[in-house]
Amino acid sequence: MSVFGEKDRFAIEAMRTRVVDGKPKIRFRMWVDHKMVGDYSQEIDLIDCVNYLAFFISLTNKRYKAELDQLTKGEVFETIYSAVKQGDSFLSTDVVKKEDKSMSLGDDYDLMMQGTEYDNSIFAEFDEGEFSGKMDDLKPTLSAEDYEKHCHVDSIGLESFKDKFNMILVEGKHEVQRLLWRSTDNPQIHEVFLPPKYFEDVGRQFISWAELETGMKLKKSWVRLWKS
């Protein structure tokens, strides 16, 4: 097996198993804050996994919406999954109400960013809009399809995640990444803050390994699943 990244922060673990009809299969899971996310007993298609991941990485810097910075982890989950499910919420209102409103970005974020300076001009392309702080006033500016493409990590894990785990990646101010996930049989939402582009760096390590395993080189033709 191979591990890319740091298990106490974020990592991808994969192990090649066999080739079926010319397609390499792997076992796949992620590690977030020492917690395993993904069914490692389930084989998935390596090339399909890379296709999703490569396209997801191509959307870096397009996962930032200022209004999400003001939301708790439960509200972020509710907002994005409700957009995709067209109002069919994955979370009960009780779960959202129990969120600690003081932890919008939290002490971990403040500690991470202390003494760090960034050029805020990179955010000029985003329309921050107005947000009153109430969930009812938050009107997503991305379509449901765009929310799924931009923020959902589930698709990368294929059958390892399907019907088992939900995972979202959003970008906060200064490009800090908020990785949120939960098991589908448990309403508890977990969250970890990652440095800018950390998820993408780990993803590229995994893709480099996949290139060696398959003898293929990543190019535009690999990114076919979202664009077919």
Image (spheres, rainbow, N blue to C red):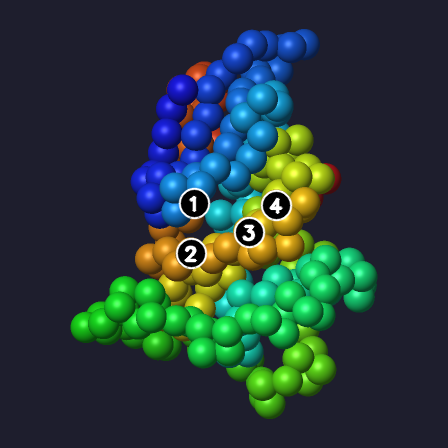
Precedes in sequence: disc 2 or disc 1: 1
Callout 2 crowding tier (Cα within 10 Å): few <14, some 14–19, many ≥20: some
The residue at which mark 1 appears reads as 32
- Amino acid type for the residue under numbered disc 3: Trp
- Amino acid type for the residue under numbered disc 4: Ser
The residues tagged by marks 3 and 4 sit, at their Cα atoms, a distance apart of 7 Å
Q: Is 163 in front, or is 140?
A: 163
The residues tagged by marks 2 and 4 sit, at their Cα atoms, a distance apart of 15 Å
The residue at which mark 4 appears reads as 183
Do the numbered discs 2 and 1 sit on residues whose CB atoms are within 8 Å? yes
The residue at which mark 3 appears reads as 181
x and y, in percent, of residue 72 in the image = 53, 71
x and y, in percent, of residue 177 in the image = 42, 60
Secondary-structure class at tag 4: strand
Name the residue: 78% across, 58% down.
85
Q: Can the viewer see residue 51 in this picture?
A: no
Which quadrant holds the C terminus?
A: top right
Which quadrant holds the N terminus?
A: top left
Precedes in sequence: disc 3 or disc 1: 1
Secondary-structure class at tag 3: strand
Precedes in sequence: disc 3 or disc 2: 3
Do the numbered discs 3 and 1 sit on residues whose CB atoms are within 8 Å? yes
